[in-house]
């Protein structure tokens, strides 16, 4: 097989050479493809009818995000787990590429003020305090129990992972519990919101230079880690060659990283704020509580804009329609690959999924977001809290690796290729 010079250079740092393995793919599940496309058309029509074409466009972006995540099995949870357990750095390297591309695009949008709607673009910039330290740490633990982060939960659910049903339900429950305690956590000590561009003398150009230097440094460190630990490579996913690879094969991590960065920037340009996921879970949980007679509108979290959303259709909520798109996009992609095959949920995994979902939901509310809203979009917005989130989630991952085996969850080993 032919490989790029970059792939060859990186691969030499590992025990197992990650060549492009062409394997026999499962037959395309054509009825499911048709079902998914039909469902997407119906949902898009409903969104445009209830809301507008801006929300419809965001739904389409969500579809594309779901496709990119599924085709590359792009992970945040697995990337942290592989790095800490065996020193595999492939996932974190893809993160650095994704964050670098997104930072460049975000800097252009912020500095020019360009959006398709004419609204001033705003980044995900939040305070750094006790709440984010605790919340991100809990989220790091939770995503290792639930075997998926916020984006991972959605695309894995769409891709046919049965356990993600439990994770998502628990995620919503944890989110509403976090919303209930939100006022308490916001009252604890914290620094004011800070983005690098606010530092005197930097601006967006200076902030971009600083972040690109940090990404390059982290990437260089990952190469040194790979050389020192000589870790196993990720298991190659079934794929094919040529144009069929777009719909039937598997995408390289770097390809998906760039696509995700482009789509996040497009999200910013369309709705005026970056990609996020978990605020919708709190909304869904709040609506469910309201339906049972519990008035959550009096809670601190539901003041202002969050409270207004409670009285409207979820189809008018930008984050919700994007989440629906991610699930459907992943479902359609899995059907194209022939991999949509839900299975039974083992008791241990079920328990871990529930605990993981609760911790992620609660942690996301405390930490002003998840691996997408806080880590990805936060760092791309040049916010200090995004970097802090990543560090604390990594520490949470480290602790979780000691507990995962109790639930029958396997950690990567240094003796073979890893998931």
Image (spheres, rainbow, N blue to C red):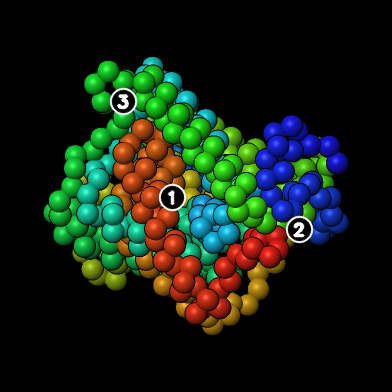
* Image quarter of residue 300: bottom left
- The residue sitting at 76% across, 58% down in the picture is 338
Where residue 197 is drawn, which disc sits there? 3
- The residue sitting at 42% across, 30% down in the picture is 211
Q: Is residue 323 above or below residue 295?
A: above
Q: Is residue 187 above or below residue 294?
A: above
Label 1: few (<14), some or many (≥20) within 10 Å? many
Between 95 and 355, the residue placed more toward the observer is 95
Looking at the image, tell me whether mark 2 or mark 1 is earlier in sequence order: 2
Q: Quadrant of the N terminus?
A: top right
**Residue 116 in picture, x, y percent from top left:** 44, 24
Q: Could you say whether the residue bearing mark 3 is in a helix, strand or loop? A: helix
Do the residues under discs 3 and 2 have CB atoms within 8 angstroms? no
**Residue 19 in picture, x, y percent from top left:** 78, 47
Tell me the distance, in whole angstroms, between the alpha carbons under discs 2 and 1: 28 Å
- The residue sitting at 49% across, 80% down in the picture is 406
Looking at the image, tell me whether mark 3 or mark 1 is earlier in sequence order: 3
**Residue 364 in picture, x, y percent from top left:** 35, 56
- Front of the two marks 3 and 2: 3
Which residue is tagged 1? 371
* Image quarter of residue 241: top right
**Residue 286 in picture, x, y percent from top left:** 30, 61
- The residue sitting at 81% across, 59% down in the picture is 26
Label 3: few (<14), some or many (≥20) within 10 Å? some
Looking at the image, tell me whether mark 3 or mark 2 is earlier in sequence order: 3
Tell me the distance, in whole angstroms, between the alpha carbons under discs 3 and 2: 46 Å
Is residue 109 among the parts visible in the rendering? no
Q: Could you say whether the residue bearing mark 2 is in a helix, strand or loop? A: loop
- Front of the two marks 2 and 1: 1
Do the residues under discs 3 and 1 have CB atoms within 8 angstroms? no
Of all residues, the one furthest to the front in this rendering is 228
Which residue is tagged 2? 338
């Amino acid at each position: 097989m032919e490989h790029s010079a970059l792939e060859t250079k990186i691969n030499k740092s590992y025990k197992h050479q990650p060549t492009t393995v062409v394997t026999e793919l499962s037959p395309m599940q054509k009825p499911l493809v048709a079902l998914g496309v039909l469902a997407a058309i119906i949902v898009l029509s409903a969104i445009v009818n209830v809301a507008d074409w801006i929300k419809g466009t965001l739904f389409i972006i969500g579809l594309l995000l779901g496709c990119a995540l599924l085709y590359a099995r792009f992970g945040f949870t697995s990337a942290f787990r592989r790095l800490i357990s065996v020193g595999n750095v492939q996932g974190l390297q893809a993160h650095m590429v994704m964050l670098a591309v997104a930072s460049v695009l975000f800097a252009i949008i912020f500095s020019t003020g360009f959006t398709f709607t004419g609204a001033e673009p705003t980044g995900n910039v939040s305070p750094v305090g006790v709440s984010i330290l605790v919340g991100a740490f809990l989220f790091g633990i939770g995503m290792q129990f639930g075997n998926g982060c916020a984006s991972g939960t959605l695309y894995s659910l769409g891709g046919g992972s049965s356990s993600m049903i439990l994770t998502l339900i628990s995620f919503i429950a944890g989110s509403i519990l976090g919303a209930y305690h939100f006022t308490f956590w916001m009252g604890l000590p914290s620094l004011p919101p800070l983005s690098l561009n606010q530092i005197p003398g930097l601006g967006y150009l200076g902030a971009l230079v600083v972040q690109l230097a940090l990404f390059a440094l982290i990437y260089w460190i990952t190469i040194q880690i790979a050389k020192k630990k000589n870790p196993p490579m990720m298991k190659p996913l079934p794929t094919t060659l040529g144009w069929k690879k777009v719909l039937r094969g598997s995408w390289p991590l770097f390809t998906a990283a760039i696509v995700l960065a482009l789509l996040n920037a497009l999200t910013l340009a369309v709705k005026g704020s970056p990609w996020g996921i978990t605020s919708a879970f709190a909304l869904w949980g709040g609506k469910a509580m309201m339906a049972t007679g519990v008035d959550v509108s009096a809670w601190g979290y539901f003041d202002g804009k969050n409270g207004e959303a409670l009285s409207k259709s979820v189809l008018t909520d930008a984050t919700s329609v994007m989440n629906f798109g991610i699930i459907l996009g992943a479902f359609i992609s899995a059907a194209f690959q022939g991999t949509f095959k839900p299975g039974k949920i083992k008791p241990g995994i079920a328990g871990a999924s529930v605990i993981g979902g609760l911790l992620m939901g609660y942690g996301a509310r405390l930490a002003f977001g998840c691996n997408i809203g806080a880590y990805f979009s936060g760092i791309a917005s040049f916010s200090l809290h995004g970097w802090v989130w990543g560090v604390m989630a990594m520490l949470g991952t480290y602790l979780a690796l000691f507990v995962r085996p109790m639930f029958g969850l396997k950690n990567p080993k240094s003796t073979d290729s890893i998931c």
